[in-house]
Image (cartoon, rainbow, N blue to C red):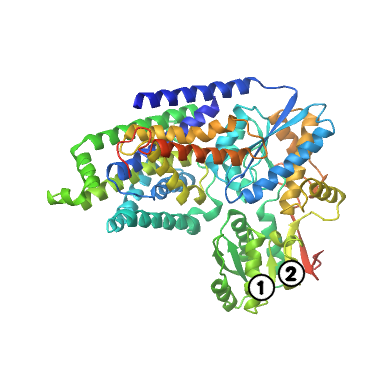
Amino acid sequence: MEYFIHLAILISIYAILGLSLNLVVGFTGLLSITQAAFYGIGAYTTAILLTSSGMNFFVALVIGMIITAVCSFVIGFVLSKFKDDYYALGSFGFNVIIYSIFLNWQSLTRGPLGIPGIPRPSLFGFTFSENLSFLILSVVFLALIYFICQFITTSSFGRVLKAIREDEEAISVFGYRTLWYKLAIFVIGAMMASVAGALFASYITFVDPSTFTLTESIFILAIIILGGLANNKGAVIGAICLILLPEILRFVGFPNDIAAQMRQVTYGVILILLMLYRPQGLVGEYRL
Amino acid sequence: MNKKILWVIGIVVVVVIVVASIRGANNNTDTIKIGFIGPLTGDAALYGEPAKNIIQMAIDEINEKGGINGQQIQFIPEDGKCNGKDAVSAAQKLINIDKVQVILGGFCSSESMAIVPVATDAKVTLFSYASSNPSLTGISPFFVRDYPSDSSQGEVLARIAYNDKRWRKVAFIQEQTDYSAGIFKAFSDRFQKDGGVVIKEEYSSNTNDFRSILAKLRDSNSDALFIDPQTPASAVRIITQMSQMNWKPALIANDILSDPNVFPENFSFFNGAIGAKFDASLTSSKSLSFIDAYKKKYGSEPPYLSYAETEYDSVYIVKDAILNVGNNGENIANWLRTSVVDWEGASGKITILSNGDRDGGHTPFVIKDATISPYIK
């Protein structure tokens, strides 16, 4: 049972990441590949505050969100100068920069040694040390963020975002300052990713820079492309699929010698087939 | 369409849970299951693959000789991918589905760090054959390792550099990995406490051109240079470029360079270099028979000998533990911490302390005429 609880926790964390990136990529059409950086900032802030000052998890989570907001505001502002492919490349660069900061600012992050012993959250004397209680906590966060996303995307603000995605010039003719809209959704998405980071740090109890590389950003992007862009349900479904798929492949019964490699290969083949036969993703409403 | 997809996903999830629980319930009591976690895919698979092969080989040897008390060992390797998230998934699967009592792993310290709490909660022994991060010392009563902590290596070398060689300023070139960073930390803590100065330059693992950092270190007029790589490959590049620059400082090296098979053509460059490796003599009979067995099975020298020996030993230590106290994670962990004293293995004499670390740590050596000889003051 613990195994399934563990997978459910991972799914909640990655669903939050998927939802946060979907706001930026799916609804606004900005191909951002830097979500792991914000995920990492959230995780590191929580890790550092919890281990060095023994601060409460929920306070650390909010501080992490604020720090992420500031960083993402600056990054988003720079990125707003770019368009399309250049935007993707620019965001790619920021992921690398943030990763190098985790790796090199050793007085703060301990560099490649990572930060061990991050405690589990506690609230009013109750500690979420059991995995089941932690699962409930992360599902609550997921539900909250899901409803916020749902609210954003169905509001008039969300409609402007979709209009930006379809034709930025046209919407700016109507007097909308698209820069601020793009910046706002970028910052909101980053803050949500930082929540996922805080949950991750306190669940795994250890963070090191290798978790927040470019590959992780691409994995998050894969979640929403597979689940379906511009659909909040799609982000959750994508997370379920991409977390469960490799786990299912553990039980296929490949011989020990090649099991791990075959898992990777099969995983890749399934993703390729999915994209071939369902390029809009499982429940997608928009294609890149 | 949406509903159909949700149905498909639902069915798949149910099937997985059913299959997994059947496999869990189907626990065959005739075999002893031993789990393994290491990086089997990704960059670090370079180490994880041989680790898996060597452990598989040791288990096959035991099984051929009749197993443990007549019970065969079933080996279940899982991919930890050198990161915490995947290692925890693998550990949860091994513990809850396969119901193993012992997990050999992780390889990377990032794997071990993340699975220690999982193993502790489940009262399963976690035996690392390669993680050297000093933060793992005494981290949990269920964690032991037969690979020494980086801190012993760094300290031994710092003492020699400061007290014997009377070096006061050491230039340091370090790869940005947890292993190398751990050695640096231990070295510089000791060396600076004594009053020395360390000037460090770091490089990322995919660096090819070291000339600018080497030039910078040369200009620092240090008494010696400490080379602290993660892999022999980057060490070779550093040495080659140093010889092109015609810079021949006094050298200190970490135990990556302790294997004379690694790069014979550059070995003359290392004359007089000091290093430290843990008590593993290439002449011990267990080590030799291990190397022979490996050559017979895989047709080549065992790669990364310092890891290979501890990997091989870990299986036999666990075998002794199960022989003595049965296949129970808690008992095994206790036994390992109290009863492994001067255990003769391929990696030399192993004593595991009550904090789970390997005792004795590193002994210094000097490289002379392309061979390794013990360091004498």
Quadrant where the N terminus of chain A sits is: top right
Left or right: residue B207 versus residue B70 is left
User: Regarding mark 1 in the picture, which secondary structure is present there?
Assistant: strand
> Spatial distance from mark 1 to mark 2, Cα to Cα?
22 Å
Question: Which residue is painted at 38% across and 40% down in the image?
Answer: A225
Horizontal and vertical percent for residue B212? 54, 73
Horizontal and vertical percent for residue A81? 27, 59
Label 1, residues with CA under 10 Å away: few <14, some 14-19, many ≥20:
many
Quadrant where the C terminus of chain A sits is: top left
Horizontal and vertical percent for residue B296? 82, 47
Q: Is residue B266 above or below residue A264?
A: below
Single out the residue that lies furthest toward the front.
A277
Give the label, 1 or 2, closer to the camera: 2
Q: Amino acid at mark 1?
A: Ala
Q: Is residue B103 above or below residue A97?
A: above
Per the image, the residue denoted by label 2 is: B265
Left or right: residue B276 versus residue A263 is right
Question: Which residue is painted at 55% across and 71% down in the image?
Answer: B213
Discs 1 and 2 share one subunit: yes
Camera sees residue B168:
no
Per the image, the residue denoted by label 1 is: B224
Q: Chain of mark 2?
A: B
Horizontal and vertical percent for residue A100? 46, 58
Question: Which residue is painted at 52% across and 48% down in the image?
Answer: A115
Q: Is residue A283 above or below residue B301?
A: above
User: Regarding mark 2 in the picture, which secondary structure is present there?
Assistant: helix
Q: Earlier in the sequence, mark 1 or mark 2?
A: 1
Q: Amino acid at mark 2?
A: Glu
Residue B199 sits in quarter: bottom right
